[in-house]
Amino acid sequence: MATVKGTVLAKRNAGQPVEKAHENVAALFNALISKEGFQKRFDELLGARAPQFISSMVTMINDDPYMMEVFRDNPISIIKAGLRAAAYDLPIDPALGQAYIVPFRNKGKMEATFIIGYKGLYQLAVRTGVYKKINVVDVRDGELLSYDRLTEEAEFRWMEDEEERQKMPIAGYCAYFELTNGMRKCIYRTTQQINCHEKKFRKGNYQSKGWRDNWEAMASKTVLRELLGKWGLLSINYQTADPATLKIASDLATGQIDDEQHVIDLQAEPVPDNVDPATGEVKTDKTTQEQQDDAILEASLDM
């Protein structure tokens, strides 16, 4: 039903001034989350900050043509992605780099999914309270002196001249943490290993938008995520930690912090011949009864 409502809204907005169309998005989005019971969940997760967060979701939809397509085709997917960001209490403003709601095309229809950023992953780890230090750095050619695959002990000699260092190609990335109990751990991954990881988990034949637009941030996140999933959160007090912290700890430890591996690139999947590439609508010959049903639905939405 939500998908049909979105399609009706798109038809109604056709030819309207941009300001009016944006007002309709805000009105319908707020009505949808209220009717479907999502508003209560946002309030439970965010409290007094819920209205601001929801407003940021509306702004995100209005600012991105692809998200407008998602809003027409599958608005519930936007809401569910927003709830995941709210559950981790991460802002979805792309400029902050903590969390993203990403549009993608799936079988001719647009959907949205939640993606955590490198900075968001770092924030979640820090919130558990078990990390004294945590960091990820790029390693330039010549800086790695040795790395033991078994013990994962590494030795580096960092270049002191930053200008000269920036001229050298990136050989890999190293992630490191020290827990409050004194335990230390690091892993080093070459750029080749990171590229192999990206190719293994991509969907389709192309890199996702995140990898294309910000490869270094995605590489940092990949190495940090592996470190935390393999060795992290070893001293959290599971008897006294609050439910939100336990959720973060569980997701970090099991590698389920986001749906990155399920994202399909916008251009990776060819649009079927029976789908309008401009609107994403499936072209079908409707019966008279179906046309009448559509007219009744549209009239009910105008009431």
Image: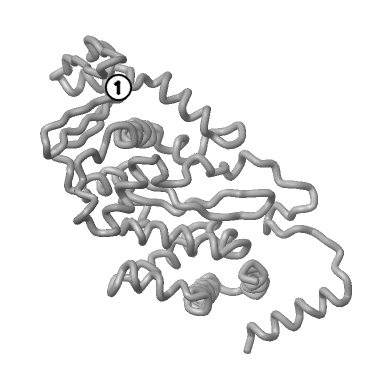
Q: In the structure shown, which secondary structural element does the residue marked by tag 1 occupy? A: strand
Q: Residue furthest front?
A: 239
Residue 66 in percent (x, y) is at 55, 55
Is 255 placed left or right of 33 in the picture? left
Q: Residue furthest bottom?
A: 303
Residue occupying the point 11% across, 37% down: 181
Residue 56 lies in quadrant: bottom left
Which residue position is annotated with label 1?
188
Residue 289 lies in quadrant: bottom right
Q: Above or below — where is 184 with respect to 255?
A: above
- Label 1: how many residues lie within 10 Å, few (<14), some (14-19) or many (20+)? many
Residue 227 in percent (x, y) is at 30, 32
Q: Above or below — where is 156 with respect to 102?
A: above
Residue 236 in percent (x, y) is at 21, 45
Quarter of the rendering occupied by the C terminus = bottom right
Residue 161 in percent (x, y) is at 15, 19
Residue 282 lies in quadrant: bottom right
Residue occupying the point 11% across, 33% down: 182
Coloration of the structure image: one colour
Quarter of the rendering occupied by the N terminus = bottom right
- Amino acid marked by disc 1: Tyr
The front one of 65 and 211 is 211
Residue occupying the point 75% across, 53% down: 275
Residue occupying the point 26% across, 19% down: 152
Is 61 placed left or right of 91 in the picture? right
How many numbered markers are drawn? 1
Q: Above or below — where is 92 with respect to 226?
A: below
Q: Is residue 30 visible?
A: yes
